[in-house]
Image (tube, grey):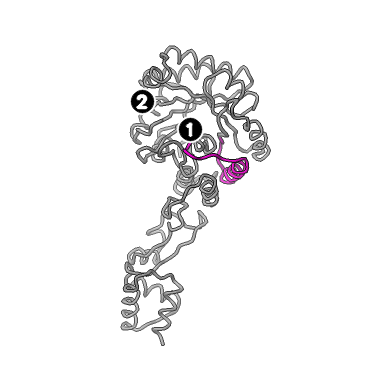
Amino acid sequence: MNSNFSGIIDSTLREGEQAPGVRFCCRDRTALIRALLAVGVDEIELGIASPANDHIPGLMAETRRLAEGGCRLALWSRCRPEDIAFAARCRPDVLSLSIPVSDLHISQRLQRDRAWVLRTVAASIHRARSLGMERVALGLEDGSRADQDFLLQVAETAATSGAFRVRLADTVGICSPGAITALVRKLRGTVDIDIGVHCHNDFGMATANSIAALEAGAGWLDATVLGIGERAGNCRLEEVIGFLALQQGSDRYRPEQLPSLCRLLATAAGLTIAANHPLVGRELFTCETGLHQHGLAVNPATYEPYDPGRVGAQRQLLFGLKTGTRAIHLQLASQGIELSQRQLQHLVSSVRAGGESLDREQLLLLASRRET
């Protein structure tokens, strides 16, 4: 992990609720916040600062009691005076302003120009700080498709206006790890400000891009539980926490809390967690292949990147068509069962021809019949 790493920003309650058909009730929001705090995220984006979202003030107050100062609480906001004023009444620890920086968005969606963007950035940050919000960040929407010189100019304006962080958004998920590495390094080499990234998953690279950004010197990354969000979603919180904790050795996160968090989100959002979903899928540590079972019997590290117990899981072996003689012999031997070579071959043939995979208890029961 790079020395600039500051933390993970969870955006499930903001970006996640933008997914079609998803609407969290008050009970869902509170339960998710408790679970996010248990995992150890560093900042929670509670929603969009807008007078239309009248649940935000109460949610902010409740979350502040739950967090007890251990996690920053943030709101996302457009660069509109009325939204910034609403945010100020909620008193977030961080206000994350957002503005488009690509000409496509500036000219065609907003029908504005670059000069308007620069004026609006400076005015919005000054307004937010004048209303008592000391930590103001600026999201660079569609930053991956912006003219890079203008992107740097906006970031410099944010820094000189008093923002503490800019957040580079790969809004339509077009970056590769190499491309986002180059963008982060360019920002770091030009502007003296914290850098975060907000990666979308349209080509399946959101998590990889987020980790690449950290390795390039970014300090912050956005993520959502199960990657929930617009279109293909976002960087998956469970993946980055798992990687940082189990591969990079970070002790600030608690990966054993990830399965319950993900199940909670899946229920609230009406999603199904794939059985092989990274870190939290129910069949991740289920193995039927003979070659792999042999390796697991010798040393689990041969075919497991981390101890299943680190994410609250257990290894399960199945025995069926893909299981060989050596794997079955090792399993029986571990339980003190010795069969003759002929009995073992008959057992293996029965297992492979059975049509359905057996768990260990079923295998041992079948083997005990061969002993008699």
What label sits on residue 94 in the rendered view? none
The residue at which mark 1 appears reads as 219
- Count of numbered badges drawn on the protein: 2
Q: Is residue 264 above or below residue 182?
A: below
Residue at 37% x, 32% y: name it: 181
Which amino acid, by three-letter code, is at mark 1?
Gly
| The C terminus sits in image quarter | bottom left
Instruction: Provide the residue span drawn in magenta.
Output: 18-44
Left or right: residue 187 versus residue 255 is left
Q: Is residue 76 left or right of residue 209?
A: right
Q: Residues within 10 Å of mark 1 (few under 14, many from 20)?
A: many
Residue 315 located within the stretch drawn in magenta = no
Q: Position of residue 251 (x, y in %)?
A: 53, 46
Q: Which residue is mark 2?
A: 145
- Quadrant for residue 213, please give it: top left
Whichever of labels 2 and 1 marks the residue nearer the N terminus, that label is 2
Front residue of this view, candidates 37 and 7? 37
Residue 157 seen from this side: yes
Q: Residue at x 64, y 33 (%)?
A: 60
Spot occupied by residue 328 in the image (x, y as percentages of width and height):
37, 73
Q: Residue furthest bottom?
A: 372
Secondary structure beneath dot 1 equals: loop
Mark nearer the viewer, 2 or 1: 2
Out of 182 and 206, give the one closest to the viewer: 206
Quarter of the image where one finds residue 72: top right
Mark 2: amino acid: Arg
